[in-house]
Image (spheres, rainbow, N blue to C red):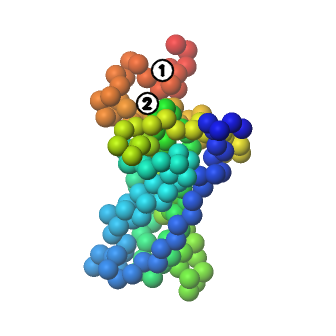
Amino acid sequence: MTVTSKPASYSFTIMNELVFPNDTNPLHNLMGGRLLHLMDIAAAISAQKHSNHIVVTASVDNVSFKHPVKLGDVITIHAKVTRAFSTSMEIRLEVFSENIQPNSRIKSNEAYYTFVALDEHGNPVPVPELIPETDEEKLLYETALSRRELRLILANKMKPENATQLKALFFPEM
């Protein structure tokens, strides 16, 4: 491993929060915006650990709320860099909610965030390459290019005809 690369495991971050009344809506469910805020913090910590720089959020992929998180639940957020590009990093987040009384834990959300590393003047800086080690890390690393192309197309920063990874996925004979 060189100075310009880091294993994916180095960026792994776990963040825990307890859901209080001021975090909930009238149905006593965690407000979606509050959860996105917590996910953004966990993803930023993971990206900063990988890049050793201040980072800013560049994009948030689709976030689906699969299961409500209730008042009094403990939220556990797992964040890890899945791929590093020149100045940006893709971070995968998984959110679990746990009710301590019946001792139940359920996956409530997952998402991908993209962060850009910045220098002290606010200019993008190169980030270390990512070394995937486990089979899951290798799969997430390989599929990150397709997710990146989709993000760039949706942001009008790439034309669909230039998305080589997505074309190979949908039209393998080409």
Outermost residue toward the top in this view: 174
Residue at the spot 36% in from the left edge and 38% down from the top edge: 123
Of residues 17 and 57, the one nearer the viewer is 57
Of residues 102 and 156, the one nearer the viewer is 156
Q: Quadrant of the N terminus?
A: top right
Q: Report, in whole angstroms, how far the alpha carbon at label 1 lies from the one at label 2.
A: 8 Å
Q: Position of residue 24 (x, y in %)?
A: 33, 76
- Quadrant of the image occupied by residue 159: top left
In this view of the protein, can residue 55 be seen by the observer?
A: yes
**Is 18 drawn above or below residue 110 in the view shown?**
below
Outermost residue toward the front in this view: 120
Of residues 136 and 38, the one nearer the viewer is 38
Q: Position of residue 64 (x, y in %)?
A: 41, 55
Contact? badges 1 and 2 (CB < 8 Å): yes
Residue at the spot 68% in from the left edge and 36% down from the top edge: 2
Which residue lies under the disc numbered 1? 164
N-term-proximal mark, 1 vs 2: 2
- Quadrant of the image occupied by residue 152: top left
Q: Amino acid at mark 1?
A: Thr
Which residue lies under the disc numbered 2? 149
Q: Amino acid at mark 2?
A: Glu
**Is 48 drawn above or below residue 73 in the view shown?**
above
Q: Position of residue 38 (x, y in %)?
A: 42, 64
Residue at the spot 42% in from the left edge and 78% down from the top edge: 19
Q: Position of residue 4 (x, y in %)?
A: 61, 36
